[in-house]
Amino acid sequence: MHTRRRWPVAALWAAVILLAAVLTAASGEAQELYTPEQAERGLSVFRAECVTCHGSGLQGRSGPPLVGDNFLKAWARPDRTADDLFYILRTTMPPGRSRALTDRQHADVLAYILRQNGFSAGTSELGSDAALLDTPLEHAGVGEGNESALPPDFIEGDRGLDPTGEGPTQAELNAAAGDTRNWLYQTQNYAGTRYSSLDQIDRTNVAALRPVCAHQLGELRNFQTSPVVYDGVMYLTTLHVTVAIDATTCKPVWKHEWDVQDRDVWGNNRGVAVKDGRVVRATSDGYLVALDRLTGELLWARHTANADLGETYTMAPMIYQDLILVGPAGSENAVRGWIGAFRLQDGQPVWRFNIVPEPGEPGSETWDNPPGIPVGGGAVWTPLSLDTDRGLLHVPATNPAPDFPAALRGGVNLYTNAMIALDVRTGRLVWYDQLVPADDHDWDLTQVSPLYRTEVNGEERDLIATVGKDGVLRVLDRDSHERLFETPVTTLENTEAPVTTDGTYACPGILGGVEWSGPAYNPGTNMLYTPAVDWCGTYILADTVRYVEGENYLGGEWEFGDSWGGWITAVDASDGAVRWRYRSDRPMVANVTTTAGGLVLSGELNGDFLALDAETGDVLYRFHTGGPMGGGIVTYEIDGTQYIAVMSGLPSGFWVDEYAGSPTAFVFALQ
C-alpha cells in the first residue's frame, strides 16, 4: 500500500488570476491587494504545497504557469468577481485536500503570487475586505471591445491546405487491425483492440529486450500521448508540441509548436490522427490543427471549441473517410458535452450530436435542474471506436454536472455516462446504453472498445466492451444490446450510498476505476486485459451549489484516500470470469497492449515498463524508464525487426510521487 503524504495545488493558478485581474479600480488606479507580510507567509505555503505542479519560479510544470496572457483571458472579465474564484480555490485546492488549508493560507498564497507578478503591496491583507472581493474582474486592454484579443476562427498555412505527401489511405486505415508495419490509431485500429499479430517478440525471448533508442521531448509538462506510427515515422504530442521521429533510431524528423490563440483550459493531450498526408491533433485552447505529415508545416487550424465555456480538447481525434471525429473535455466545468464531425480538408463542421440535449431535444426531459443550476457534463476525452461494416461510431460520454448533487439535476441525465452509437456520416443517434445513470460520484464512462467477435455459449456474437471510473467492465451485444456480463476490475465499496454534506467514503474515489487507457483484446487467448486505479476517497456534498462559468462545478469537495494501487485484470471475453490479476503498488494508467507472441505490455507509475505472460499474468520482463508511465505502448515491424515503443514521464501532478521524470519515448527490440 502506498500512503499519500502531500498533494500540490494543481489548479491554484485559477484563483491567482482571478484576484490578480482586479488591477484597476473605478478610478483606474491599481488596487493594493495584500501586505508584504502576507506575501511572505504565502511564499512558505507555496513552497510546501505548490512547487511540484507550478515550479519554484511559477513557470509551470504539471500545472500551468502562474503568469501570462492565458490567465488574463480566463479572468479579466466584467462578469467575474474576485470572490467567484476565491470560492473555487478554497473548495477545490489543493486537489483532494482543500480543507487542509485555512482560508487565510489560501489568501496568503494568492498574495505571494500577486507580488511575484509585480502588483503593489498595501496596508490591508488580501481577503479582509469583502467589498474588494466583489469587484468586477476587468483589466485594461483585455475583454470586450479589444478585437485583437479574440481568437481567429480559421488560420491557413503559408503553403495552402494541401499536403505534400500521401497516406495512410482509407484502405490502410480499414485494414489496420492486420497491419504489422504501422500503428495507425491511438488504440491500433478502428475497433480499438490494442492487439498486434506480431510474434517475433514472445514469452520465450522477451527477457532479451533492450532499448535501442530514446527521444526526450525536452519539457516538464504532462505526458499522456499515445503514439501513431506510419511508414517508419512516429508521431507524438505534448500540450503544445507535435513531433515526428524516426521509429527505429528516435532521430527527429520535424517539430511543430502550436502558437496558442485562446486560453489553455487543461494541460493534457493524448495524441494525433493521420490520413491522406495529414497529421491532425486538437488543442487545449479549442482548435483542430492539420499539419503536413512529411514536413510538419501548418496546413490549417480551425477554432471549434469554446474555452470561455470550459471546453478543451484532450483526446486524440479519429479520422474516417473525409471526417475528423472529436469532442471536447470539460464535464467538471459544466460544458454541454458534444461530439462532432469536421471536414478533413479544412475543418469545416459537418455534424454535431449534443450529448447533453438542448431544450426540446430527445433526452432533455431527463434533466430537471432548478434555476441557477445549469445543465452540463457529458464531455468526451478518451478514444472512440468505429464499426466500419455498420457505419456506427461508438462514443464514451462522461459524467453530468454539477458532479455530486444528483438530486438537483433530477432524472437520469441523458446521455451522460452512456455508450452512444451514432451514424458516422450524419451523427444520428442509433442506440445507446447509459451505464451509470444519475451519477453523483464523477464516474465517467471512459471506454467504448474494444469491438470484437467471439463465441458465447456456442454462438458467435459481435460484442463491445465498456468500462469507466466506476471500475466495472461491461460487455454488450452489438445486435441485441444485451449486457452479457459486468465484472469489477478494482475495489468496489459503498457504491450505492448517496453523497452527503458530512462526506461519503466510497471506492472507487474520484480518480479511481479506469482512466484514459482502456482494455486490450487478444483473440488468441480470448481475454480482455484492463488497467485500473485502486484508490478510494470521500465525496462531500456542498451546502450550497455555486456556478462560475467555465470553471470547476462539482457541487462539493472531495478527499483522496490514504492509500492507492492499481491492477491489470485479465477477463474471459465470453463470460467475464477473472482469469488473473496483476497488482501494482501504484495506479495503472498507462496503455495496455497485447500481442500474438503471448504478451501483455504496459507500464507503471514507478517507472517500470512491463511484459506479462498473457495466459498467466507472470512478469516476464521489467525495465525502469526513470519516470512514471501513463501514455502509449505500441509495437510495429520495420525491415524484419519488431519494435516496442513506450512513453515515460509525468502523466500529471495527480500521478507522481517524488520523481516526475521527463517526457521520453523509448524504443525496444530484441538483442
Image: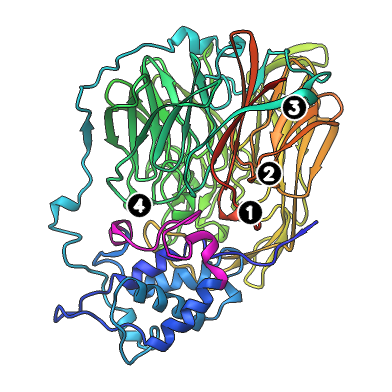
Q: Residue at x 65, y 15 (%)?
A: 642
- Whole-number angstrom distance, CA of label 2 to CA of label 1: 9 Å
Q: Type of residue at label 1? A: Tyr
Which is more foreground, mark 1 or mark 4?
A: 1
- Residue 309, numbered label: 4
- Whole-number angstrom distance, CA of label 2 to CA of label 3: 17 Å
Quarter of the image where the N terminus is located: bottom right
Which circle's residue, 1 or 4, is located before the other in the chain? 4
Mark 2 in CB contact with mark 1 (< 8 angstroms): yes
Q: Is residue 222 above or below residue 130?
A: above
Q: Type of residue at label 3? A: Val
Which circle's residue, 2 or 4, is located before the other in the chain? 4
Label 2 element class: loop
- Whole-number angstrom distance, CA of label 4 to CA of label 3: 40 Å
Which circle's residue, 2 or 1, is located before the other in the chain? 2
Q: Which residue is mark 1?
A: 659
Mark 3 in CB contact with mark 1 (< 8 angstroms): no
- Whole-number angstrom distance, CA of label 2 to CA of label 4: 36 Å
| Residue toward you, 290 or 53 | 53
Q: Which residue is mark 2?
A: 607
| Residue toward you, 433 or 88 | 88
Q: Which residues are magenta?
A: 48-73
Q: Which residue is mark 3?
A: 600
Which is more foreground, mark 2 or mark 4?
A: 2
- Tell me the crowding category of disc 2: few under 14, some 14 to 19, or many 20 or more residues within 10 angstroms, Cα based: many
Q: Is residue 114 above or below residue 433?
A: below
User: Exactly how many numbered labels are in the figure?
Assistant: 4
Report which quarter residue 350 is drawn in.
top left
Image coords of residue 199 (percent x, y)? 73, 13
Which is more foreground, mark 3 or mark 1?
A: 1
